[in-house]
Image (tube, rainbow, N blue to C red):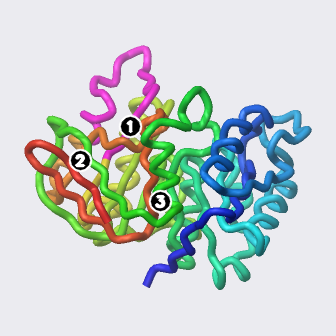
Amino acid sequence: MIKHPAYLKKGDTIGIVCPAGYMALEKVETCINTLQDWGFQVKIGKTVGSDSTTYFSGTDEERLSDLQTMMDDDDVNAVLFGRGGYGMGRIIDQIDFKKFKDNPKWLIGYSDITILHSHLFSNYYISSIHAPMAAAFNDGGNKNEFVLSLRNVLLGKKIKYSCPVHEFNKKGEAIGELVGGNLALLAHSIGTGSDIKTKGKILFIEDIGEQSYNIDRMFYQLKRSRKLSKLAGLIIGGFTDVKDTERPFGKNAYEIIKDIISEYDYPVCFDFPVSHTDRNYALKIGIGYKLKVGKSKVVLEE
């Protein structure tokens, strides 16, 4: 059975760290203020607004230490990541989960954080939250339904999301544990200690800034490794800022995916609000969901 961290209550503490790319402290201020308005206390890690001069928020050792400290801190009830980018894969095998697995807390993020979600689920069967990070609170984002969905999840409210139909959808109903995240990270995790088993699962996938041919290549990697063949259902989120080669690939992201999965008969939803844009609902990894892909709308609920 999935290990389910305790939901939060007013007065609980949320830690914020940056285990990958650098993030200036001022970019986190709106998030801090909003979390406090929600009734939580906030603890800031050393990697937030650090004195790093490189792409990363610190050395591998500094980022590992900051994350480990937050994960093991008895006074911290959840950990929200400031941003993703790249870097989690460099430290994932050095994280000590000994204390965490006995007393898990919610780890919250997406993009590069996908590898942590997958690692937690595949190795320790612990649930985590794929959701907007600190940067999403800026520019009025703290008031949109997607950031607010994170508050609802943290407080233990049942999830039920809906979205319009897409012409590429495959109608049907599926029940299964929800897994997934960023396509590039899922593909790169295959064959590692963070690889996920997808048989009987509802898989969700999104990405940003990829070349069309690379989307094709990574989906074939999932297909060839049998990650797509025995799913309960498939959710395709946003594929934003997709680039094309000088000589056109000939298909957009959704057309590429549609053709690769054409042989499978499980329900599929395209353009679900999980993405690198502000359309990014909070989703609990490893929790059982029901996916209904109908004629007039799509519904995903616990």
Q: In terms of depth relative to the viewer, which is nearer, 36 or 232?
A: 36
Tell me which residue sits at (74%, 60%) in the image. Answer: 91
On screen, residue 298 versus residue 245, left or right, reads left
Q: Which corner quadrant of the image does residue 1 belong to?
A: bottom left
Report, in whole angstroms, how far the alpha carbon at label 2 lies from the one at label 3. 22 Å
Report x, y in % for residue 90.
72, 55
Which residue is disc 2 drawn over?
Answer: 269
Q: Nearer the viewer, residue 101 or 103?
A: 103
Q: Is residue 291 above or below residue 246?
A: below
> Mark 1 or mark 2, which has the lower sequence index?
1
Horizontal side, residue 170 vs residue 71: left or right = left
Circle 3: residue type: Val
**Residue at image location 34% in from the left, 24% down from the top:** 249
Q: Position of residue 136 (x, y in %)?
A: 58, 37
Q: Nearer the viewer, mark 3 or mark 1?
A: 3
Q: Which residue is labeled 3 in the image? A: 153
Residue 246 in the magenta stretch? The answer is: yes
Q: Which residues are magenta?
A: 236-257
Please give the label number shown on residue 152: none
3 or 1: tag closer to the N-terminus = 3
Q: Is residue 211 magenta?
A: no
Report the residue marked by disc 1: 238
Residue 302 x, y percent position in the rendering = 32, 66
Q: Residues within 10 Å of mark 3 (few under 14, many from 20)?
A: some
Q: CA distance from mark 3 to mark 1?
A: 21 Å
Residue 9 is left or right of residue 93, and the answer is left
Q: Is residue 218 left or right of residue 29?
A: left
| Residue located 59% across and 53% down the image | 113
Assign a secondary structure to mark 1: strand
